Amino acid sequence: MSRREETEQGAAAPPRQATLGVGMVGYAFMGAAHSQGWRTAGHVFDLPMRPALAAICGRDRTAVDAAAARHGWAAAETDWRALIARDDVQLVDICTPGDSHAEIAIAALEAGKHVLCEKPLANTVAEAEAMVAAAERAAARGQVAIVGFNYRKVPAITYARTLIAEGRLGALRHVRATYLQDWLVDPESPLTWRLKREHAGSGALGDLGAHIVDLAQYLTGERLVGVSAVSETFVRSRPALAGPGAGLSGAADGTARGEVTVDDATLFTGRLASGALASFEATRMAAGRKNALRLEINGERGSLAFDLERLNELSFHDHTEPAVTAGFRRILVTEPEHPYLEAWWPPGHGLGYEHTFVHQAADVVRTIATGSAPMPSFADGLQVQRVLAAVEESAEKNSVHTTVPF
Ligand SMILES: NC(=O)c1ccc[n+]([C@@H]2O[C@H](COP(=O)([O-])OP(=O)(O)OC[C@H]3O[C@@H](n4cnc5c(N)ncnc54)[C@H](O)[C@@H]3O)[C@@H](O)[C@H]2O)c1
């Protein structure tokens, strides 16, 4: 035993925990949320490897240095290629707009790094297919590629999946999914990258619809096989921003306006592989709705309902109970037996939005350490992308029913 492995009292030091060096690209909204996840996961969960916040990347030196200091990253780069090349980075976490996901993810996978990539996986099906091909080649070398559908990591949602898989709802009949926000109601809200097709791929559809499509498929264990859609852009021009890639916090210059090239709202119906029916609404124009992701799933034996604005709760109706006493009851999903909860607070001391990113980070670490199948995988992200493309095609063709390729 070397002197460094001994404590001052001469006792053997605990074995040093392996680390997973993380390099993150982008440091605004998701960058802050993911930083929180990486910082916290190893302190809450008993993980086989401890995440190390090795380096963060942005394009502006002053801003990225400030972000590194604020969020706890050891180093900062101004070129994502330099981040990928670092020896202390084993996982690249992509928190940039969709137009850069494919290029960064494929380069990172080909450089031998694991990848966590924000949703939607890409801006087009072709990009997502190339990312899946790169992920498959990388998987053969033991690398992991995961897409950041973080709402799967809300304990109530993870638990809902268990109840459905156990047959508590019986054969499924309906999925009703809405994701409503209101931050674009004001026509003077600026023209951020989220309103430009070349950066975001689509609007409410890819931003919000991607989440509820993923959740519908995750919860039911089935894929959507066909859709019929309507879509609208209510405000067609908005105050232009100084920089083309400016984010939510960017300031408008007050004069020029630019064209909105994505949907403000998209609604669609769909059919699941079993024949169950589904309906979806994604909008950033629902005044008063801040982050209202709501799900209801009805089966022959019962129903489940969930609202992200009350994310510690799951409503369950057991239709096999006598009608005189049956009804929706509130399950407070904070018991230690519920998913992820054993590591957190006593029952009733609820979790919030940020915890989904802690759970995501913990799951990524466990997947890498154990060699288990990545969830959600890039293939899951591609399937969602195919649904989004079918929805856009249907909306363009006056709602004609459109098959989702498999
Ligand atoms: N999982 C979720 O709930 C959720 C929520 C919001 C956004 N997202 C997704 O996360 C991604 C980022 O969204 P956001 O809200 O954080 O956007 P944002 O505008 O807040 O931040 C984007 C960041 O990417 C940086 N960036 C852009 N291009 C870059 C490049 N080429 N190299 C380095 N840095 C670059 C910007 O400087 C900024 O730091 C998008 O794919 C979005 O759809 C997911």
Image: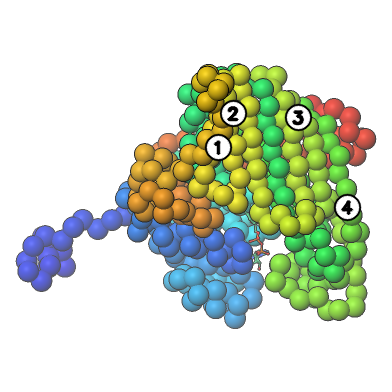
Callout 3: helix, strand or loop?
strand
SS type, badge 1? strand
CB contact under 8 Å: marks 1 and 2: yes
Q: Is residue 363 above or below residue 74?
A: above
Q: CA distance from mark 2 to mark 4?
A: 34 Å
Instruction: Work out whether 358 lies above or below 329.
Output: below
Q: Earlier in the sequence, mark 1 or mark 2?
A: 2
Instruction: State whether residue 146 appears in this view.
Output: no
* Residue bearing mark 4: 233
Which circle, 3 or 2, is nearer the viewer? Answer: 2
Disc 3 marks which residue? Answer: 270
**What's the residue type where badge 2 is placed?**
Ser
Q: Which mark is residue 303?
A: 2
Badge 3: how crowded within 10 Å, few (<14), some, or many (20+)?
many
User: As shown in the figure, which amino acid type bears the numbered disc 3?
Assistant: Gly
**Location of mark 1 (residue):** 315
Given contact means CB atoms under 8 Å apart, are the residues at marks 2 and 4 in contact? Answer: no
